[in-house]
Amino acid sequence: MIKMSDSKEKLLNLNEGRTLAYSENGNASSSTVVIFFHGVFGIGDASKLSRTLVAKNVHYVAPTLPGWGNSSPLPSSTSYPCGLLSDITALINHLHPSDADLKLYVCGGSYGTVPAQIIYGASFDVFPLGRQIAGLLLIAPFSPFRWHKDYTKCMTLPNYIMFGLGYKVPFRLLPRLAVFAIRGKVKTPEKAEKFIRNTLFDNMGEEERAAFAIWRDTEGRAEGQLEREMAENVARSVEKTWDGLLEVTDVLHGDWGYRPDTLDEGHVRRPILIVTSTGDKMAGSGMANWLVANYKNARLKSVVGGHLAALFHIDEIWTDFLEREPRTEGSSESCY
């Protein structure tokens, strides 16, 4: 059963009284499905669809991760990978029941690259729909800290305190302190806009500002529109609960269900595109480079700018990503 929460979002009722929020756009009858996972302080937002995705006739689905926005937190007895895979299985089966031609493209930005990787590498026994995955797109990615031993060298000091040191301090003390410090800054869309302007937009370099202006004109966006839309999503993401943020550190350090460099051919034949930005101080290139070295069918693409730079090159990225096909079963040659 589905109920509408507003014009942009739908709510899917799950087992145990939980809810999964999601947004969708494009051709809902298409067997080509692009699933995109948001980052920290985000929600699933499909209100604007890239021209490339429209031309490719895809069904674009943007779930809201557990514990963010209107998506229920996972039960404490359920591991993050198991809960995520269960939620996404329910969503795909609801939207595309018995679709024998289903082709899934799994994507994520920033923290959203974590659930994207969990789904990509999941055992087919646990996640049978994984056999339908045709590719993985990771933008400004995180690596699995469980296997990437030098991950701290790739982090800014604030990120290290929150996500590195925070894992070693019991009772989620540092994440709880972060919530206390940030809560007032994102309580309303107006306050959230000031917060993201200070954090993201005011730090843009000259070249990125130029790319932003071109993108804004091409997309027909008014000046300040992107900032306001992002701020609204930030405020909505923590309006009901902070559970999503509180578990980020545990998820980053936790068991994702596999090790990237030991995936079997059935998994690694699906190409991976990893996108990083030259001036991204929030998610530098170190983790992206580790992922390229450890996934057997991964390729790196770099764009100029900071943490938001990929957005201003998104049509180019989608074209590059969707035109790559999985290797034929049994082939040992890379498609790159």
Image: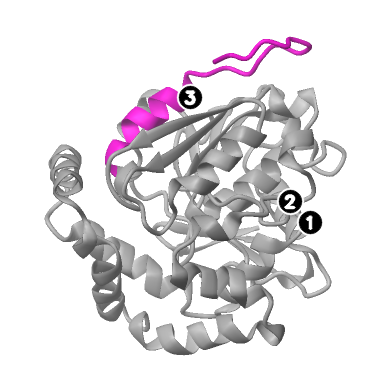
**Looking at the image, what colour scheme do you see?**
one colour
Estimate how packed mark 1 is, as few (under 14), some (14 to 19) or many (20 or more) residues with alpha carbons within 10 Å: some
Is residue 109 visible in the rendered image? The answer is: yes
The answer to whether 333 appears left or right of 36 in the picture is right
Distance from disc 3 to disc 1, alpha carbons, whole Å, reads 28 Å
Residue 96 drawn at (x, y percent): 65, 37
Q: What amino acid is found at the position of numbered circle 2 in the picture?
A: Leu
Is residue 64 visible in the rendered image? The answer is: no
Q: Residue at x 66, y 22 (%)?
A: 101
Q: Are marks 3 and 2 in contact (CB under 8 Å)?
A: no
Q: What amino acid is found at the position of numbered circle 1 in the picture?
A: Cys
Task: Label 3, secondary structure: give it.
Answer: helix
Q: Label 2: which residue? A: 85
Q: Are marks 2 and 1 in contact (CB under 8 Å)?
A: yes
Q: What are the residue bounds of the magenta stretch?
A: 312-336
Residue 294 drawn at (x, y percent): 66, 36
Q: What label sits on residue 82 in the rendered view?
A: 1
Q: Label 3: which residue? A: 322
Q: What amino acid is found at the position of numbered circle 3 in the picture?
A: Leu
